Image: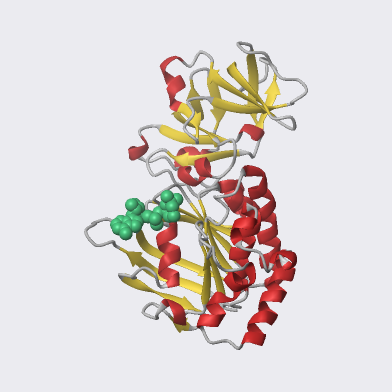
Amino acid sequence: MATVTYDKATRIYPGTERPAVDQLDLHIEDGEFLVLVGPSGCGKSTSLRMLAGLEDVNAGRIMIGDREVTDVQPKDRDIAMVFQNYALYPHMSVADNMGFALKIAGTPKAEIRKRVEEAAKILDLTEYLDRKPKALSGGQRQRVAMGRAIVRQPQVFLMDEPLSNLDAKLRVQTRTQIASLQRRLGVTTVYVTHDQTEALTMGDRIAVLKDGLLQQVGSPRDMYDTPANVFVAGFIGSPAMNIGSFQVVDGAAQLGQTRIPLERSVVGSLTPEDRGHITIGFRPESLDLVTQAQEGAIPVKVALVEELGSDAFVYGDLVGAGAAAKDIHSGAGDARVIVRVDPRRVPAKDETIWVSVRPGERHVFSASTGLRIAV
Ligand SMILES: Nc1ncnc2c1ncn2[C@@H]1O[C@H](COP(=O)(O)OP(=O)(O)OP(=O)(O)O)[C@@H](O)[C@H]1O
Ligand SMILES: [Mg+2]
């Protein structure tokens, strides 16, 4: 087992100007499950492939434990990778698929058999060892791909969207299996996904990337409670956080009829670049239904209610905000305010509800830099 360290690791693909991964600094603890997450093209796979040795590092370095591996051949890095497209050999049995890398490495037959049987037991594949991949379900094939990595007893597991070929239900099941398996084996793991729910549920820590730049690293709780900037705020959480650009007037943030009083320190942090504006975020679950009379109550006209059984979400528009209504949206891009409501008492379409942001559950960001302002 080992730690993994990216030290200003940079990848610039030939013929491109902007780095796909730009000076990545990231330290992963021994035995830790770290999830790299971000939108398509942000550099997740490139980061993982640099660690695997499948992609050149143009600047900076990569360490596994105390050993610098920046220029070490992939086969000498003592890692095992599980890809999205886990391509099993169709003509080989499950056991042969799982043991293939060991066979190539010249491991004695008895040792291979032992490790394959152990892995099969862990993965619940014992009864399928003699089958061919085509006679397995998608989830079973995925487990064979995991088994192929486990038998190698590597220092580090690398996984690139290993669940994306599975249907929604199997994905949820398999993600808990992988997470608990990783904890049992205690092998340092770097796991790539674009799915923030997967990141929140699986990782000890999450690293969010955007345009090749690391935005924030922290525990799922950190990322959810104290997003470092507007991007992370909008990316982590489902449905996404409501994010609005408010005008600062007389010590309060104002948008249409909505007035949210601000701490003095927040008002004091405004710079000329902010042009008198501040960005405020609040999650759908941080809003309470209140009466119109309540100070600071925000009127929302219900456009749509999404009922999920355990939860219900109102998608609505700010009332009376006029042209300013476009200044608030959910981080996911919907031009609407999202409010979680009691699923047993959902409002009707076109009704106006009044909501207020629960104290301590609002997020304040600089309008010009997008960075979190500590309050
Ligand atoms: N071989 C390549 N040559 C040139 N550019 C590349 C190459 N591979 C990837 N890129 C670019 O590098 C950036 C990062 O790509 P990468 O595959 O790491 O993204 P990703 O985060 O894994 O995305 P996805 O979620 O879609 O898999 C993208 O802009 C991509 O177009
Ligand atoms: Mg990728």
**Residue 152 point in image, percent of width and height:** 58, 77
Image-quadrant location for residue 16: bottom left
Most foreground residue, 221 or 188 = 188
Residue 167 versus residue 241 in the image, above or below: below
Image-quadrant location for residue 32: bottom right
**Residue appearing at x 48%, y 73% in the figure:** 5
**Residue appearing at x 41%, y 38% in the figure:** 367
Question: Coloring scheme of the render?
Answer: secondary structure
**Residue 193 point in image, percent of width and height:** 52, 53
Most foreground residue, 51 or 141 = 141
**Quadrant location of the C terminus in the rendered image:** top right
**Residue appearing at x 61%, y 68% in the figure:** 93
Image-quadrant location for residue 296: top right
Residue sitting at the far top: 350
**Quadrant location of the N terminus in the rendered image:** bottom right
Most foreground residue, 180 or 144 = 144
Report whether residue 229 is seen: yes
**Residue 290 point in image, percent of width and height:** 70, 21
70 relative position to 208: left or right: left
Please tell me in which quarter of the rendered image ligand 1 is found: bottom left
Residue sitting at the far left: 15
**Residue appearing at x 55%, y 73% in the figure:** 156
Most foreground residue, 233 or 116 = 116
